[in-house]
Image (cartoon, coloured by chain):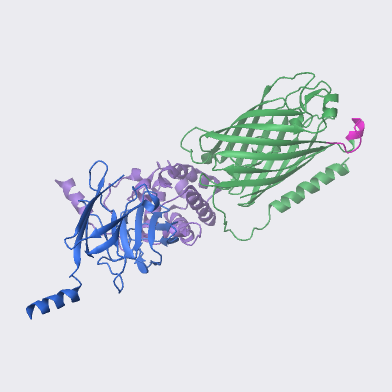
Chain colours: A green, B blue, C purple
């Protein structure tokens, strides 16, 4: 039986795609700097990447000669929850990226079942830094060398009482990651792989470490996208997550996305996302809708 | 009769009191310094516009400013002929004149008026190695030292101020100043710098 | 003796009509900066010489009025630029032309080109290729050969 919830999701997705595919006013693109879509979009953690996976690309439209940046807003309506994030990033000389994101996780009606109250909100602030250490994803077409970056993300989660009550060990945590991104223009492909050392439970919203495991574990993020037109990237992402809490199993996350450059400064993304089980509620699937303005 | 005529001619030519000022600018290791600017400031300047016998033009040629140092009178209009095929973007942040000029290949059309005395350091935004200097002076007695390090000026006898400018001089305005007395026989001095 | 005379002839040869002379240089297809595609599929994807001519003329027409890069092209020999770009693309796309221009470093020396200028050129080239209806996959295959030239072209 098609639920009102899935009808709403469909509407949201359609609206996003209609917004994403207008008859753009003229072909002339008037922004300098990077090639379209070569700074990725913004992950829910605030770093430049896909929607879920961080990439080795540096935020913003500026090249080695300048400082650029981006702001983003992302909404992820799921079967029984919703997740949203908003943030900003600065890209300095295509070398260093500094980012901030605020995430909100709305338990909606499920808050009651969890004993927290209807519409109970978890949230966190994430401050990130990423440094490109080698390679140039677009220029190095004549070598197998990817662009490589190292990054760190410091999280401050709210609701520390609840976090501890569910078995979470800490309400702050730091992720460390290494990303490699390669644009294979001859195949119209964008490929990314990231290894992240983390203790985060549900991206950090449910704290860090837990009663099952309070150690750092290496997690993997992978992305693959096809440049279907100059402005459209279609692809998929995978992000593995640790299982540190005994009260609820945590699953890996997947999405299939379409990122469309409306203008050199505005990219809209729509994705189908599957975050698996979240806090004992099963099969959290839905949409990821994101808009990013970059300069 | 002849004597009176001679003195009249000499007075009219102004050469009656003129003497040769010969300044040698030398580096610490004894080597001659070319493209230093030697100026003599008289307490009473002769009337009339200052004119130098060289063109007031700062050329861009082979990705360099030619001449490297150009002396012009205050108020002069200096042209900036671009003799290269590539563009140049000439600029200066010097207090005596801040300006910038975009000069496309073979562009002969631009000029700047230097209305304040001083040293104007110029560069090119596109070619970092390009460097030049324009000295806007308010004395007619100014010259650059040549390859031998010498600058020779014809200056009336009397007391005056000798100014020597060179980028390597570690003083305010890269300038050394000294009071001098020019006799009828002339004036010579060696100025060590750096 | 004969190669010597040829070399003299090359030095003495006047610039093609409408073009200005350039300082002598060694001609070689390797100056094109990339190896040609094998087979004919890329040449066909660009609709052979007429298609390449339209793409290059469209590209140059955009560049000389694009406010982001127009300054670089003012006072330059646009006639020669069109001819050498058409030769270069024909050579790389497997059209069998000889490339008679300078290599990428010498040809762009002292123009003060920055990374963002190079990216503007790629963007304008994409628009010209779109206008010619070259498939996105053929476009990206060509860009894969052009992208590494950034290292020789960008000086500033």
Q: Is residue B65 above or below residue A113?
A: below
Q: Nearer the viewer, residue A125 or A13?
A: A125
Q: Is residue A167 above or below residue B83?
A: above
Q: Is residue C81 above or below residue A41?
A: below
Residue A204 lies in quadrant: top right
Q: Position of residue A104 (x, y in %)?
A: 79, 39
Q: Position of residue A147 (x, y in %)?
A: 54, 35
Residue B30 lies in quadrant: top left
Indicate yes or no whether the magenta region holds residue A116: yes
Q: Position of residue A127 (x, y in %)?
A: 68, 36
Residue A112 lies in quadrant: top right
At x 75%, y 19%, the residue is A213
Indicate yes or no whether the magenta region holds residue B127: no
Q: Nearer the viewer, residue B104 or A6?
A: B104
Magenta-highlighted residues: A110-121
Q: Is residue C62 left or right of residue B189?
A: right
Q: Position of residue A22 (x, y in %)?
A: 68, 56
Q: Nearer the viewer, residue A276 or B175?
A: B175
Residue A49 visible in the displayed image: no
Q: Is residue B10 left or right of residue C103?
A: left
Q: Nearer the viewer, residue B187 or A186?
A: B187
């Amino acid at each position: 039986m098609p639920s009102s919830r899935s009808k709403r999701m469909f509407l949201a997705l359609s609206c996003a795609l209609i917004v994403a595919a207008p008859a753009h006013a003229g072909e002339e693109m008037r922004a300098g700097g990077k090639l379209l879509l070569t700074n990725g979009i913004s992950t829910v953690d605030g770093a430049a990447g896909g929607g879920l996976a961080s990439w080795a690309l540096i935020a913003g439209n500026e090249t080695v000669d300048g400082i650029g940046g981006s702001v983003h807003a992302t909404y992820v309506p799921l079967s029984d929850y919703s997740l949203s994030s908003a943030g900003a990033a600065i890209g300095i000389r295509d070398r260093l990226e500094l980012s901030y994101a605020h995430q909100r996780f709305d338990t909606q009606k499920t808050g009651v079942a969890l004993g927290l109250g209807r519409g109970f909100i978890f949230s966190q602030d994430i401050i990130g830094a990423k440094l490109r250490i080698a390679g140039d994803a677009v220029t190095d077409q004549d070598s197998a060398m990817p662009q490589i970056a190292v990054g760190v993300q410091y999280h401050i989660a709210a609701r520390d009482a609840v976090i501890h009550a569910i078995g979470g060990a800490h309400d702050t945590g730091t992720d460390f990651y290494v990303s490699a991104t390669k644009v294979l223009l001859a195949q119209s492909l964008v490929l990314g792989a990231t290894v992240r050392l983390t203790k985060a439970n549900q991206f950090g919203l449910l704290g860090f470490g837990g009663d099952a495991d309070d150690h750092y574990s290496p997690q993997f993020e992978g992305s693959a996208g096809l440049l279907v037109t100059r402005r459209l990237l279609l692809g998929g992402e995978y992000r593995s997550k640790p299982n540190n809490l005994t009260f609820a199993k945590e699953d890996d996350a997947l999405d299939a996305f379409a990122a469309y450059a409306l203008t050199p400064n505005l990219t809209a993304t729509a994705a189908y996302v599957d975050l698996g089980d979240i806090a004992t509620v099963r099969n959290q699937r839905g949409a990821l809708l994101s808009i990013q303005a970059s300069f | 009769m002849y004597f009176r005529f001679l003195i009249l001619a000499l007075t009219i030519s102004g050469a009656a009191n003129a003497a040769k000022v010969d300044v040698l600018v030398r580096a610490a290791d004894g080597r001659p310094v070319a493209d230093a600017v030697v100026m003599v400031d008289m307490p009473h300047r002769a009337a009339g516009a200052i004119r130098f016998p060289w063109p007031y033009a700062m050329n861009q040629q082979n990705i360099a400013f030619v001449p490297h140092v150009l002396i012009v009178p205050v108020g002069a209009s200096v042209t900036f002929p671009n003799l290269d095929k590539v563009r140049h973007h000439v600029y200066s942040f010097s207090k005596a004149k801040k300006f910038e000029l975009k000069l496309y290949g073979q562009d002969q059309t631009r000029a700047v008026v230097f209305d304040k005395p001083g040293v104007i350091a110029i560069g090119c935004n596109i070619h970092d190695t390009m460097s030049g200097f324009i000295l806007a002076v308010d004395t007619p007695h100014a010259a650059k030292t040549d390859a031998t390090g010498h600058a020779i000026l014809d200056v009336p006898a009397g007391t005056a101020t000798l100014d020597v400018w060179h980028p390597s001089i570690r003083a305010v305005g890269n300038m050394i100043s000294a009071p001098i007395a020019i006799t009828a026989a002339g004036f010579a001095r060696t100025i060590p710098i750096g | 003796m004969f190669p010597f005379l040829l070399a003299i002839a090359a030095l003495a040869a006047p610039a093609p009509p409408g073009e200005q002379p350039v300082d002598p240089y060694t001609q070689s297809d390797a100056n094109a900066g990339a190896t040609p595609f094998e087979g004919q599929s890329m040449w066909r994807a660009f609709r052979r010489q007429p298609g390449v001519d339209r793409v290059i003329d469209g590209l140059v027409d955009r560049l000389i009025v694009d406010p982001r890069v127009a300054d670089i092209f003012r006072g330059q020999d646009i006639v020669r630029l069109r001819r050498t770009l058409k030769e270069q693309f024909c050579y790389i796309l497997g059209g069998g032309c000889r490339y008679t221009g300078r290599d990428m470093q010498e040809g762009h020396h002292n123009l003060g080109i920055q990374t963002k200028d190079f990216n503007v050129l790629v963007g304008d080239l994409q628009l010209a290729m779109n206008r010619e209806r070259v498939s996105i996959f053929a476009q990206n295959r060509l860009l894969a050969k052009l992208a590494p030239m950034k290292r020789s072209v960008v000086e500033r």
